[in-house]
Amino acid sequence: MLGFSGNRTWVYAQSVHGRFQKIHRVSGVLLHAILFVTPWIPIGGHPALRIDLPARRIFLLGQTYNAGDTFLLLLVLLLAAFSLFFFTSLFGRLWCGYVCPQTVFLEEWIRPIERLIEGDRTARMRDDGKPWTAGRLARRAAKLGLFAGVAFVISMAAMSFFAGAPELWTLQGGSVEYALVGILSLGLFADFAWFREQLCIYLCPYARFQSALTDDESLVVMYDPKKGEPRGKDAVATGGCVDCKKCVVVCPQGIDIRDGFQLECITCGRCIDACEDVMHKLGHEPLVRYGTEAELRGSKTRIIRPRTVVYASLLSGLAAVLLVSLTGREAFQATINRAPGSLYTVDDDGMVRNTYLLKVTNNDDVVRPLEVRVDGLPDAVVTVAPIELAPTETAMVPVVVRMPVHADGGRTWPMTVHVGAPGGDGDDLALETTFKTQDE
């Protein structure tokens, strides 16, 4: 954690300014606003987003989703996955360069702290090559202390989505929640202080399967060797690469983009800003830019191609299913099944009795009273306890239906069980089942 590790070559990324770094600032501000502000915004009495794992429910934009909505969660995850596939096929690893929390935290917190305490690239390299002194120890301790503070603040913000921001930040949370904050803080601190670009290279699965998602017509950061080669000071007049190595020293992944697109590249655009800065001063067009391998060969880049059509079709289908599922979501759910081991019973008064188990789930965050009635059975008597569901509660309620024996009905009677608000207020759910009896 002191700036070196075995055979690893430590990356000293030089600071850079340019139009793509301005985009980084905007995306960083927006993502930090989502992280730090969302848990504090109340909508319908709950945060805009909170994942309540003990109660198995999610509060999202005023709606409450419980375990019965697992299908919706599956659709959302599939939608996110295929969105990633679709946009990667078009724009490459822009997620990694501009939206990934790893990149955002390093760009907005860690590298500015390093520059503030230890200076830019040259100063840090010179400092790390010197023997340990009191001043160097003090600088390193201050830097690592700030890294630890950043890791703790980010961990608290992330845990606020699960534990509730007011309780967590006022020290009213549970011991498990603070233990998880501690574990996450240690992981983030190790990443900030040492692991860094190795996370993108060795641990992140996205870097590994991106080659299956992209092709020669996907957007990447590329160097134009036709214009840039041969390199050297003599290229100043021709607009070729002057071999200033600015694109190399600013790279947070430690690669040379002039060697071609590489797996480690996160398409953050830092090398483009560096090349633009140098080449514009020399009066030439930059040699590093966003483009496609097809462009480099002189071919036309196609947006509509088999891979993008397949991804777009799957994405559209999933979005349609999710939209229909959300718009058709009921305020409560109910199912009814015959009680296990029970067909029918003839009571002493000659009435035939069937027993059912009614499972009801309240999907909303309000107390919901319900009543049960039965259609389709002549002279039926329904016995059921009063039902009042707490917010997002699921209950199993016995329902007893009794009916006199009728000669013209046979042994099986179809019936409809209606579950709804007392007095018939609002829509109810109609559950189809059967009533078993004996011939008269």
Image: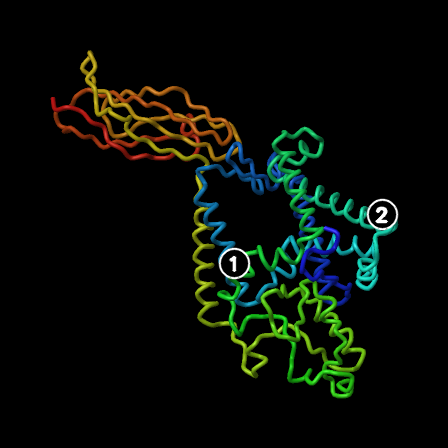
Distance between the Cα atoms at labels 1 and 2?
46 Å
**Residue at the image point whose x is 66% and y is 75% from the top:** 258
The label on residue 138 is 2
Q: Amino acid at mark 2?
A: Ala
Task: Residue 390 in the image: state x and y as whole percent.
Answer: 50, 26
Image quadrant assignment for residue 414: top left
Residue 110 against residue 235 in the figure, above or below: above
**Residue at the image point whose x is 60% and y is 38% from the top:** 162
Residue 77 against residue 126 in the figure, above or below: above
**Residue at the image point whose x is 18% and y is 24% from the top:** 437
Question: SS of the residue at dot 1?
Answer: helix
The label nearer to you, 1 versus 2, is 2
Relative to the observer, which residue lies in front, 86 or 270?
270
Task: Residue 38 in the image: state x and y as whole percent.
Answer: 65, 43
Task: Residue 253 in the image: state x and y as whole percent.
Answer: 67, 63
Q: Amino acid at mark 1?
A: Ser
Assess disc 2: are there few (<14), some (14-19) or many (≥20) residues with their C-alpha within 10 Å of its C-alpha. Answer: few
Question: For the C terminus, which image quadrant?
Answer: top left
**Residue at numbered disc 1:** 83
Q: Is residue 42 left or right of residue 369?
A: right
Assess disc 1: are there few (<14), some (14-19) or many (≥20) residues with their C-alpha within 10 Å of its C-alpha. Answer: some
